Amino acid sequence: MKLHYTTYGKGEPLVLIHGAFVNSQIWKHQIEPLSNRFRVITIDLRGHGLSDPSPLNEYSVQIFADDIMRLLDDMGIDRCVFGGLSLGAMIVQHIASKVPERVKGLVLVGAPASMRLTALEKTITTIIFPKRLALWLFGQLTTPQFMKLSFFLTWFMRGSKWLGGDETRQVIRDSISIIERSEIKKIYAAVHTFRKQNLSKGVYPVLLLNGQYDSPVLHYHARYIAKGIGERGSFKMIPKAGHACNFDSPIVFNAYVSQWMDEDVGNTVKMEVLPPNKLHRAS
């Protein structure tokens, strides 16, 4: 199975993982500005973009995470900063919970903490729209039908601003249009089965970013994650942006990430390399 990736620039590796049904084009406004200072790596998950599909019946966050870590092993990258949007944020949380020693920092964009965090979410995923029903439904749809249904449900449940501006919507449409029909239900299975990850094991800092027009549920999830990791977490709201706030408002998004990479990640790395008797001098 071929996993498509791109790498730009030099410096601290920053690995960016897209959300469900889109691909690495969602990061196009990050590549040039951030690669001037960091080594930016974008990856198309299996079944997305230019990466191959696979014969598996379902995908999971763990399967996607394993693909990414094997690729980084092949590239000789031991530790890095991971950034993830939506499903990508689920995946990088999983990586951080399983191999925290390989994480220098996390950027979580529109991040769910779990698909069953609240009582309402538990009701939806177990009673109203359980996994078996969801996979059956998405297995019946063609890719154009899935696109129409997903855009309608998003508008109905989250409002027209959730998907962002015209350019963002077009990138999402273009990304979905190239997904093979057989992959749709497999990808959704990974989203549906995501559960809370343990982010308390590491010392890495975490930057949580949400668009102003993102779902209030996801705003709650981001604050929940930030509260759980204490001083390591930093939550920022990006004005006038939807779920893909990195695409809707790239100047603000890139500025937040760059500053956080310099200050939070940079200081954490300094603390790790100083001898114990000099740790108090790091700031």
Image (cartoon, helix red, strand yellow):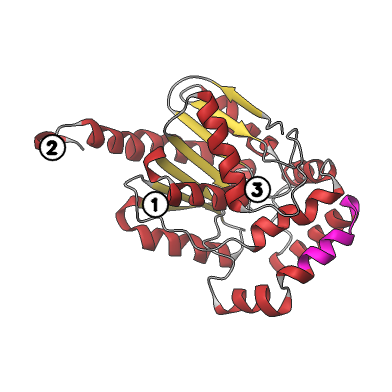
Spatial CA distance of label 3 from label 2 is: 40 Å
Spatial CA distance of label 2 from label 1 is: 26 Å
Q: Mark 2 points at which residue?
A: 276
> Front-most of 68 and 43?
68
Q: In this view, does 228 lie to the left or right of 69?
A: left
Question: In the rendered image of this protein, does residue 162 appear above or below residue 129?
Answer: above
- Picture quadrant where residue 273 is located: top left
Mark nearer the N terminus (3 vs 2)? 3
Q: Which secondary structure lies at badge 1?
A: strand
Name the kind of residue labelled 1 in the image. Ser
In this view, the mark in front (2 or 1): 2
Mark nearer the N terminus (2 vs 1)? 1
Is residue 143 magenta-colored?
Answer: yes
Q: Which residue is drawn at 72% across and 34% down?
A: 1
Question: In the rendered image of this protein, does residue 128 appear above or below residue 58?
Answer: below
The image position of residue 75, as x and y in percent, is 53, 24
Q: What stretch is highlighted in magenta?
A: 134-144
Q: Which secondary structure lies at badge 2?
A: helix
The image position of residue 12, as x and y in percent, is 43, 27
Q: Dot 2, how many residues are within 10 Å of its Cα: few (below 14), some (14-19), or many (20+)?
A: few
Q: Mark 3 points at which residue?
A: 19
Mark nearer the N terminus (1 vs 3)? 3
Name the kind of residue labelled 2 in the image. Pro
Q: Name the residue under label 1.
A: 234
Q: Which secondary structure lies at badge 3?
A: loop
Q: Can residue 180 be seen here?
A: yes
> Front-most of 181 and 59?
59
Question: In the rendered image of this protein, does residue 152 appear above or below residue 164?
Answer: below
Q: Residue at x 52, y 42 (%)?
A: 83
The tally of labels here is 3
Spatial CA distance of label 1 from label 3 is: 21 Å
